[in-house]
Image (tube, rainbow, N blue to C red):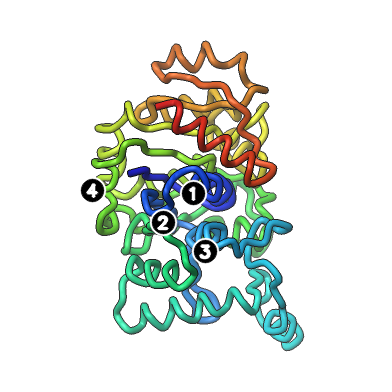
Amino acid sequence: MIVALAGGVGAAKLLAGLVTVVDPSDVTAVVNTGDDLELHGLHISPDIDSVTYALAGLDNKATGWGVVDETWTVAENLKAIGGAAWFQLGDRDLATHLFRTQRLSEGASLSEVTAELTAARGVRSHLVPMSDQPVRTRVTLAEPPPGEEREVAFQDYFVRLGHALPVASLRFSGAEAARPAPGVLEAIAAAGVVICCPSNPIVSIGPILSVPGILHALVARRDRVVGVSPIVAGTALRGPADRLLRELGHEASALGVARLYAPWVGTLLIDEADESLAGAIEALGVRCVVAPTVMTDTARAADLAKAVLGAI
């Protein structure tokens, strides 16, 4: 069994490559839900949906998020009548959120709804939220603009404010009371390899680790955990991971990622552009493997998946 700790786009790309080189049913992805939000009365799980769409072959590769061949009739009409349109939901994507919200209102757990949605999309891998209890990433802005709260929800920071404002701190609201979703700890304990996908270490992997029990389970399997650095040559390939690392006191480099992950990641894959950092990473007690990590297409993602598996 292969377990993957997954955030959004980077994880979706790697997992789409992984399932071309292994039996998809052997893959369990534990997905971040710290990004989840309620909007228009709907429960939206962006990272779960990004991974689901990618594994179903429905992802919009042009945008990196949402559904391919999307239409925007509802969003355009909502904007025209003055509704909240800062978080765009396409017409096909809305069906997912409507289904999820209805099933949750009927008493189903997020794990159960995720299993139903992935089955309906023909996804053979097992996708599970990190927790069935709500854990929400809250962002404290270093210098909030006039009229803005100092602490905002993650999607307000990331989408509405364009992740353009410096961050002073983060917290994962609800984590103390959360429990790992059913099967998460058992999957980690039984895994032949645990992959930490090239997701944002702070806001994609961080919330997963905040759920009590998950970090302890990973530490116990450290020699089977392989991470992929999302920072290449000091830069995040997508999103604000590099800026968040610096703003929160970490080094925005593959070495900085290694320092964060060293307690629970035994092996770290870094890009060829960062080969000079390999020695410093290994000095932390983290085995370092150098390989091409930039996934420009599914074939490159499959090659990276092979390198990850080969590291164990």
Q: For mark 3, what is the residue?
A: 49
Q: For mark 2, what is the residue?
A: 125
Q: For mark 4, what is the residue?
A: 186
Q: Position of residue 184 (x, y in %)?
A: 29, 51
Q: For mark 1, what is the residue?
A: 19
Whether the residues at callouts 3 and 1 have beta carbons within 8 Å, the answer is no
Looking at the rendered structure, the kind of residue marked 3 is Asp
- Residue furthest to the bottom in view is 81
Q: Earlier in the sequence, mark 4 or mark 2?
A: 2
Query: Which quarter shows the N terminus?
Result: top left
Whether the residues at callouts 1 and 2 have beta carbons within 8 Å, the answer is yes
Q: Neighbour class for label 3 at 10 Å: few (<14), some, many (≥20)?
A: many
Looking at the rendered structure, the kind of residue marked 2 is Ser
Asked whether 210 or 126 is in front, the reply is 126
At 30% from the left and 40% from the top, the residue drawn is 191
Query: Which quarter shows the C terminus?
Result: top left
At 64% from the left and 30% from the top, the residue drawn is 232
Classify mark 3: helix, strand or loop.
helix
Whether the residues at callouts 4 and 2 have beta carbons within 8 Å, the answer is no
Classify mark 2: helix, strand or loop.
loop
